[in-house]
Amino acid sequence: MLNNNTFDMKSENRGSFSSKIGVILATVGTAVGLGNVWRFPYVVGENGGGAFLFVYILSLILLGIPGVVAEFIVGRHSQANAVDSFKKLAPKTKWHWIGYSGVLAGFLIMGYYAVVVGWTLEYLIQAIAGNLSNMTTAQYGEMFDQFASHPYLPLIWMVIVMFINTVIVARGVSGGIEKASNILMPIFFVIMLIMVVNSFFLPAAKEGLLYLFKPDFSQLKPVAILIAMGQTFFSLSLGMGCLITYSSYFKKDVNLPKTAAQVVGIDSLVALLSAMIIFPAVFSFGMAPEQGPSLVFKVLPNVFQQMPVGTLWSILFYALLFIAALTSLISLHEVVTAYLYENTSLSRKKSACLVAGMVVLLGVFASLSFGVLSDVKIFGKTIFDLLDFVTASILLPVGGFFISIFVGWYLDKRIIATELRIKHPKAHLFVKGYIYLMRIFVPTCIFAVFLFSMFG
Ligand code: PFF
């Protein structure tokens, strides 16, 4: 299927992010998305609030930062996609199966992620049309349920989303999206901050913030620890080679540990701010925190309606959420497309279209699981929930486990030292410490969490 010349040409023309700010924006672009604003608050709500938050923060520091650095090392050193990076660094071994698992995870996540990005677009249009105001809490709930269970409306939005996404990916991740994020992400922050301040004035602000920040460990089920770890991987785009693919476009002067810490910091801040907006509102409007995926769509319009010029805020918010989600969807699409493009004779455009077609097919099932397929349950979960659980809580942590074993035990220490490039008289101690983390600590933690959640 592939002759060597095509392969060489394709891998030579891979391109790179042009500036350091481009690196941060693109990486924050993949990390900050629906995982922070949509998934994080409902996962916290379903798993008992403060105690869950505590475990999540622990997991971000202990597994998240070292994990991001590990993918950066593999990606930048190999300058290749999620599968070929392992083939280059570990020729004639089976390590590249980690990459296959990542490509599969990317595809499965897109199957439901695109559905939710579609919901965001619907809410943006409704906000522009001025339809997100003057309703009661119950009416906002009904509005979402009717829309999500509609036989074809959400599907149309999903197809539009995949179309936009494919056009961007087919052209390569251009300066356009980097520049757009440069302007839009700061605006996104400002809006979130204004909304947080607004939440402090809601009637049940204290209750909401206590729910979020006061840990009650008796509420923490063993499986919640697995879910916290899954959320860490999902939110940081970790465990499926996405960060390997992105860092393969990094130049040699990018400081990997510093970039990792910055990305994890910004990502966590966005998640925290979202939760600080959602929970005071949930309690003020008499809703239950454990509503699942529909939570933010039912709660936020109600918050906007209480604010002066609410329609304007809701338009801005959904527009920016759409953009944040799109930059993440692009990165998911890029993982699968980069693999296909660099390993077949297909053009970038054809590879991107093929991936989009398959995602739409899967997305139909995910979307209909809120409507006609809502009774179809596999292991007690709807198709949508199953895709989410299998990817976030299983495939990504398993991917992370093997990547850490790979970096800790297989990869030449000199490669790690070169890529970390720590300028400090005791640099070798940092490198040693990092290798210890990846060899023993990180894999043991992931393994222990799996055992504990299954049998705990
Ligand atoms: N990190 C993204 C979010 O929080 O929405 C989701 C995601 C993107 C997961 C890319 C995995 C990935 F490779």
Image (spheres, rainbow, N blue to C red):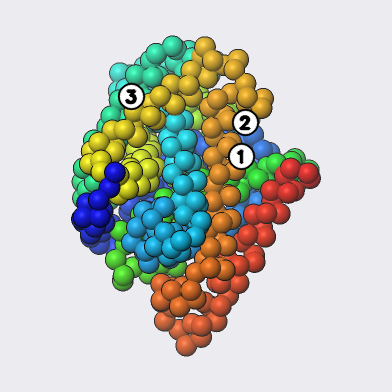
- Residue drawn at 53 percent across, 27 percent down: 384
Q: Nearer the viewer, mark 2 or mark 1?
A: 1
Q: Nearer the viewer, mark 3 or mark 2?
A: 3
**Circle 1 residues within 10 Å: few <14, some 14–19, many ≥20:** many
In 3D space, how far apart are the residues under numbered discs 3 and 2 (Cα atoms)? 31 Å
SS under mark 3 = helix
Q: Which residue is mark 3?
A: 159
Give the percent coordinates (x, y) of residue 148: 47, 18
Residue at the limit of the structure toward the bottom, as seen here: 425
Amino acid tagged 3: Val
Q: Mark 3 touching mark 2, by CB under 8 A?
A: no
| Residue 180 shown left or right of residue 400 in the figure | left
Q: Nearer the viewer, residue 31 or 385?
A: 385
Picture layout, residue 446 above or below residue 230: below
Amino acid tagged 1: Val
Q: Mark 2 touching mark 1, by CB under 8 A?
A: yes
In 3D space, how far apart are the residues under numbered discs 3 and 1 (Cα atoms)? 30 Å
- Residue drawn at 52 percent across, 19 percent down: 369
**Circle 2 residues within 10 Å: few <14, some 14–19, many ≥20:** many
Give the percent coordinates (x, y) of residue 54: 65, 51
